[in-house]
Amino acid sequence: MREIAGHFFAGGFGTELIYAFVVIVCSLMVYYGTKELYELSSHKGIKYFRQAFLFFAIAYFFRSFIKFIVFYFDVHEIFDFSPRALGPVIIFFFMYFSAMAVFYLLCSVMWKKWGDNSKKIYIFHFLAFIISLVGVLFRRIWLHVGINIFMFFLVVVIVCIAYKDSKKGKKGLNLYAIYLLLLLFWILNVIGVLIPNFLPTFQIMIYMASLGVFLMIVYKVLKKAGPV
Amino acid sequence: MAKRGKLEIVKDILVIIRDSHNSIKQTPLLRKSNLSSNRFKEYYNELLEKKFIKEVIDKKNGKYIVLTDKGFRFLEQYTIIVNFIDEFEL
């Protein structure tokens, strides 16, 4: 067991695990920190905002912890399956939940503009399913990069429209910039999972920058909503 | 005068009850809330359902509406909720 652990930590898996752990803790702090606000207000925006962070937590759980549990506790020997078979399943769930997290974040700022149409969320679930399926079935680097860049620009355009419509002016700019950074790092993370050697030199920097954005959001949430 | 949002209407109704020594009849509540009869009923039923208010029967004077602990908690947290929604553009 120690050998396996040593192998993981030597191969950068330890860093990934710590990164995933911090993201999960941050996301759950946002989710539980806003629980009372949602229970009292039943506000749709708060609901989508909370769900976005819950889905981020689930996505990162699939990204690192499942892999860790399976290898560290030799689960594959107990249940007699090849660890290689686990890869596509993990990628599928990671992509599905992280895509849904981004869509929920989008819904949280756009729900007023889109109206009270709960059917839209099913379209997003379907889209996330298709993206995950493509991610698992087709192993072409540029297809993955292309899909993610397309999604990024789609979200950028929608968020920019929302920002223009916002009457708050400068106040909202800071927040939209944080959301866009979060989306950018999400894309780099997805690409990092699908194509492990895509940006090996910058991996630590991407982790640090992503954590910075997550911590900034947690700080803003806890400052406004009160401690968990 | 700007149109009130749902949260603001809920807050206004709860404030009316609280400021009436936490005991008011339905008719003066409807009058003070500045809502049409139908909209008031919708909000009233929702507040009962969410347990923000409850009906208390007084044998002498009939039915009164009072705030529950959850209703008081909503009023305490109202500013925080509104600031949160505003801050995150939700």
Image (cartoon, coloured by chain):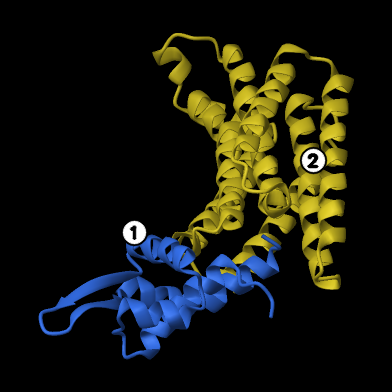
Chain colours: A yellow, B blue
Decide which of A160, A134 is in the foreground and name it. A160
Q: Position of residue A191 (x, y in %)?
A: 79, 31
Q: A104 above or below A216?
A: above
Count of all numbered marks drawn on residues in the image: 2
Decide which of A184, B30 is in the foreground and name it. B30
Q: Is residue A95 visible?
A: no
- Tell me the residue at 65%/24% (across/down): A129
Neighbor class of circle 1 (other Cα within 10 Å; few <14, some 14-19, many 20+) is few
- Tell me the residue at 27%/70% (across/down): B54
Q: A72 above or below B44?
A: above
- Tell me the residue at 84%/15% (across/down): A140
Q: Amino acid at mark 2?
A: Gln
Q: Which residue is mark 1?
A: B49
Q: Amino acid at mark 1?
A: Glu
Quarter of the figure that contains the C terminus of chain B: bottom right
Quarter of the figure that contains the N terminus of chain B: bottom right
In the picture provided, is A118 more to the left or to the right than B72? right
Disc 2 sits on a residue from what chain?
Answer: A
Disc 1 sits on a residue from what chain?
Answer: B
Q: Position of residue A41 (x, y in %)?
A: 49, 63
Q: Which residue is mark 2?
A: A203
